[in-house]
Amino acid sequence: EHDDLRAIDDDLAKLIQQATFEIGFKHILLNLKST
């Protein structure tokens, strides 16, 4: 059971990391366009 939870945590961490990266990337692009 613990291994399953750990795997879910890893997947969640990857999703959050990816989402944060994409949001940051779009934010940078918007800043570049506005200047």
Image (cartoon, rainbow, N blue to C red):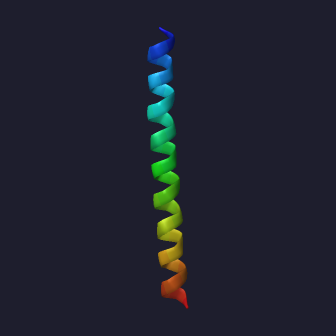
| Residue in the picture at 48% in, 35% down | 12
The quadrant in which the C terminus is found is bottom right
3 and 29: which one is in front? 3
Which residue is rendered at x = 46% and y = 60% of the image? 22
In the image, residue 33 above or below residue 28: below
**Which residue is farthest top?**
1
Residue 19: percent from the left, percent from the top?
47, 51
Question: Where 14 sits versus 21, above or below?
Answer: above
Residue that appears at 51% across and 11% down:
2
Camera-side residue: 6 or 23? 6
In this rendering, is residue 23 above or below 11? below
Q: Position of residue 16 (x, y in %)?
A: 51, 44
Where, by quadrant of the figure, is residue 31 drawn?
Answer: bottom right
Q: Residue furthest bottom?
A: 35
Task: From the top left corner, tell me how far across and down residue 18 is, in percent.
Answer: 45, 50
- Number of numbered markers: 0
